[in-house]
Amino acid sequence: MNLILKIWRQKNPKTMGNFVTYRMDDVSPEMSFLEMLDALNKKLVEEDKDPVAFDHDCREGICGSCGMYINGHPHGPVPAITTCHLSMRYFRDGDTIWVEPWRAKPFPVIKDLIVDRSAFDKIQTAGGFISVNTGAAPEANSILVRKKKSDEAFDSSVCIGCGACVAACKNASAMLFVSAKISQFALLPQGRIEAKERVRAMVEKMDELGFGSCSNTGACEAECPKQIKLTNIARLNREYYKAF
Amino acid sequence: MNKILFSSISKKFVLALAGVFLLMFLPVHLIINLMLLKSDPEPFNKAAHFMATFPVIKIIEIVLIAAILIHIFYGIFLQIQNWLARPVGYVSGNKSDTSFFSKFMIWTGASVFTFLVIHFFNFYFIRLGLVRGDPEDFYSVVHSLFKIPVYNYIYLVCFTLLGLHLFHAFSSAFQTLGLNHRIWTPVINVIAWIYAIALPLGFAFISITIWQFR
């Protein structure tokens, strides 16, 4: 199929960017979106032009690197997948595809479609851990956990920190990310010990970095490739009130 | 401690609490307004007089005005912060599947505020003696206002927008207060629907009845 791509090109964080139009002919519907971009880049390199910079790593939907905003959706219009899993068969011949980087003040553009997501790392290092003494692994059954709770904690822990929630949110809020990271500990006995310090530190860091606040719009939940639920945000709120 | 008191979540908590108070006040107001449909002005005027003079209500009135001011102040403050969090927008827009009316809360809120200013000029300021009128006969004041078509149009538009505001506000308040439940949240969402439709409809019914049939 033949496509028209409108891709955001920006040399570095300081320069102004703009959209550049590329024609892509003979795109195979079996290609993934990233493979299609690889093909475009091959063409650009052959023409001695600067290839489009985009983040990617595992290409298996696990690492969360390949974030880009495609036709009004983070990771494209198909729910519950990352860009690397987005197949070109979801597009039609003759389509115009707009590709933009994540837009949020705490996620500055580094180049083209690559944004600096270290803001998430900063939130995580502020409190997203449990303090344990290293040594031999303790007996796993010495602390009993209800199956339902451990399942919920697991569902929260599948967040890959891709930033789609921030990209989708009209307020560029990081609440879904932070709530998932809070929940994966808050639901388990090992995480309860430092629950108050953790939630205070992570929310404080989130605010400090300039993320917006949550207005319960639900765009984050709709776009999350790992289907993290809004119930996590309610839990984050509860955990925060308990920390007073 | 200051950081906790003024964090984004704390601000949202206060905004939601003030909002919940306003949500509880509206049905009370509607019940009193229903007395306007009677041909006898006495019950409504008595209720208005009671609301204006009873000491406990006086205290609630202060809380109510504080709730309105806090709700407006925090709403605007958070909205500006949210706008600043995304200095560059998307060309392809946002097509995510979201709670539609939640996107326009600041604008539906602004229209409710506009109505509130008109409302204050028509009634509250009369009671305070700032605007001319008889504070003992609000029944006639309301009836004469509802006879003006333009006033009715503004009234109906503002209440439609209030309905859109309430539609998101009702369920959103629960989520902000940390109350999200597998069974109860869908029930709350249905109640929010009913509340957001029934309440403005009730107010509109009164104004249209007086305008057309009295």
Image (cartoon, coloured by chain):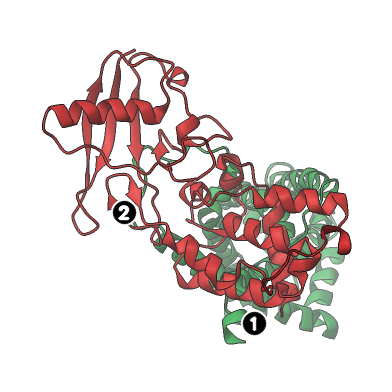
Chain colours: A red, B green
User: Could you tell me if residue B122 is visible in this image?
Assistant: yes
Residue B177 percent location from the top left of the image: 73, 64
Task: Tell me the chain of label 2.
Answer: A
- Please give left or right for residue B7 compared with residue A15 in the image: right
Asked where in the image residue B84 lies, by quadrant, the reply is: bottom left
- Please give left or right for residue A120 compared with residue B149 in the image: left
Q: Residue furthest front?
A: A136
Mark 1 secondary-structure assignment: helix
- Nearer the observer, disc 1 or disc 2? 2
Instruction: Indicate whether B124 appears above or below B167.
Output: below
Q: Residues within 10 Å of mark 2 (few under 14, many from 20)?
A: many
Q: In this rendered view, identify the residue nearer to me: A203 or A30.
A: A30
Residue at position x 64%, y 41% from top?
A227
Amino acid at pointer 2: Val
Q: In this rendered view, identify the residue nearer to me: A23 or B100.
A: A23
Q: Residue furthest left?
A: A48
Mark 2 secondary-structure assignment: strand
Instruction: Indicate whether A72 appears above or below A119.
Output: above
The residue that disc 1 covers is: B128
Amino acid at pointer 1: Leu
